[in-house]
């Protein structure tokens, strides 16, 4: 890998070193950063056999010819930020080996700064459907999840099949509520673009992800409508973050408050419709507004 320049990325707001390297060499180098990880576990699409790889080849070619690769360097560790498909997948193999360029971020970045960078590098995914078509599973793709796993130790569970699943539902089903705004009629709308940026840039975003994944770690719910209570907490959490609140809101504290509240007996008998969702969110909102449980 040959260093060709240093500079400041005005969009990402970081200093970097720019390196030139053959694509085949970068593949080997990037994979060496993950020697302790099974990359294939983040690449289930590689299990499928394709009769015609031409489209996959063309997509990889366009990515190689027009984009940089990005990585983050922290001490002896390197983290790939952008380029998973081009470097780690076996399908759509190219018959050329061009010289490519990789920007390696050399600034010491906070956790939320890194998440904001990942958001910037993945914003192109929003061009298909716009922000209201924000798809958590799509956006937090294999490369994003690999980064979250290695850098923060957060393993986002993708669901598995019926026989091998380890959780009642996929983590994506819960994380999706972090990006939705509660309205009295429904919760089908994602936050607006400016608010999505606020979430990915918030100083607590990594801890929020960690908490959300943690509270979804169950096969049998501890009480009826538990999943609705989890969803309501996640929407409450993102509501506070969009409002600029950086307080700590521990889910287990709210479970304890719930069990002492008369709403608990009502919740476990609810049908799980929109009315349930609205009532759960109002439970969190009223606690916050009345300072009954200020965390």
Image (cartoon, rainbow, N blue to C red):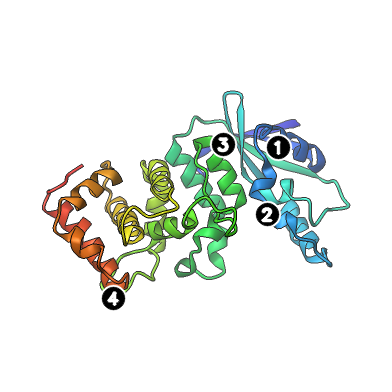
Instruction: Give x and y (percent) for residue 228.
Output: 33, 61
Determine which of the numbered discs, if any, sits on residue 30 in the image.
1
Give how far apart the Cα atoms at labels 1 and 3 are: 13 Å
Q: CA distance from mark 2 to mark 3?
A: 18 Å
Mark linked to residue 185: 4
Residue 11 locus on image (x, y percent): 51, 47
Distance between the alpha carbons at the discs numbered 2 and 4: 37 Å
Quadrant in which residue 276 is drawn: bottom left
Q: What residue sits 51% from the left and 45% below the top?
A: 117
Report the residue marked by disc 2.
Answer: 44
Mark in front: 1 vs 3? 3
Dot 2: element: helix
Q: Could you tell me if the residues under marks 2 and 3 are in contact, i.e. CB atoms within 8 Å? A: no
Whichever of callouts 1 and 3 sits on the residue coming sooner in the sequence is 1
Q: Residue at x 54, y 53 (%)?
A: 140
Residue at screen point 72% across, 37% down: 31
Residue 41 visible in the picture: yes
Mark 4 residue element: loop
**Closer mark to the observer between disc 1 and disc 4:** 4
Comparing marks 2 and 1, which lies closer to the viewer? 2
Q: Could you tell which of marks 2 and 4 lies nearer the N-terminus?
A: 2
User: Marks 2/1: CA distance?
Assistant: 19 Å
Q: Nearer the viewer, mark 2 or mark 4?
A: 2
Residue under pointer 3 = 150
Compare residues 289 and 4 and report the one nearer the observer. 289
Q: Residue at x 59, y 56 (%)?
A: 163
Q: Residues within 10 Å of mark 3 (few under 14, many from 20)?
A: some
Relative side of 112 to 150, left or right: left
Q: Quadrant of residue 59?
A: bottom right
Q: Looking at the image, can residue 83 be seen?
A: no
* Observer-nearest of 218 and 140: 218
């Amino acid at each position: 890998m040959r260093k060709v320049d240093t500079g400041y990325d005005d969009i990402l707001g970081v200093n970097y070193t720019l390196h030139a390297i053959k694509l085949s060499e970068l593949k080997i180098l990037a994979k060496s950063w993950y020697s302790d990880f099974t990359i294939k576990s983040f690449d289930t699409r590689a299990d499928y056999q394709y009769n015609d790889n031409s489209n996959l080849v063309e997509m990889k070619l366009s990515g190689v010819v027009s984009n940089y690769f990005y990585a983050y360097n922290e001490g002896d560790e390197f983290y790939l930020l952008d380029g998973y498909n081009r470097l780690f997948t076996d399908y759509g193999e190219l018959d050329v080996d061009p010289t490519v360029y990789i920007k390696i971020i050399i600034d010491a970045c906070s956790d939320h700064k890194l998440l904001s960078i990942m958001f910037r590098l993945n914003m192109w995914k929003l061009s298909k459907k716009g922000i209201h078509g924000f798809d958590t599973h799509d956006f937090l793709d294999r490369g994003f999840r690999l980064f979250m796993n290695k850098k923060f130790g957060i393993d986002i569970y993708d669901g598995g099949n019926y026989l091998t699943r380890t959780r009642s539902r996929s983590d994506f089903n819960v994380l999706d509520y972090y990006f939705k705004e509660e309205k009295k009629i429904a919760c089908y709308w994602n936050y607006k673009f400016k608010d999505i940026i606020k979430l990915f840039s918030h100083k607590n975003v990594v801890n929020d992800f960690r908490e959300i994944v943690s509270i979804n770690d169950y096969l049998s719910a501890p009480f009826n409508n538990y999943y609705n209570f989890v969803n309501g907490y996640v929407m409450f959490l993102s509501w506070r973050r969009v409002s600029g609140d950086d307080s700590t809101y521990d889910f287990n504290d709210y479970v304890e408050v719930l069990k002492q509240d008369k709403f608990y007996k009502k919740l476990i008998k609810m049908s799980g419709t929109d009315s349930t969702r609205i009532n759960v969110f109002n439970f969190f909102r009223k606690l916050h507004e009345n300072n009954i449980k200020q965390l």
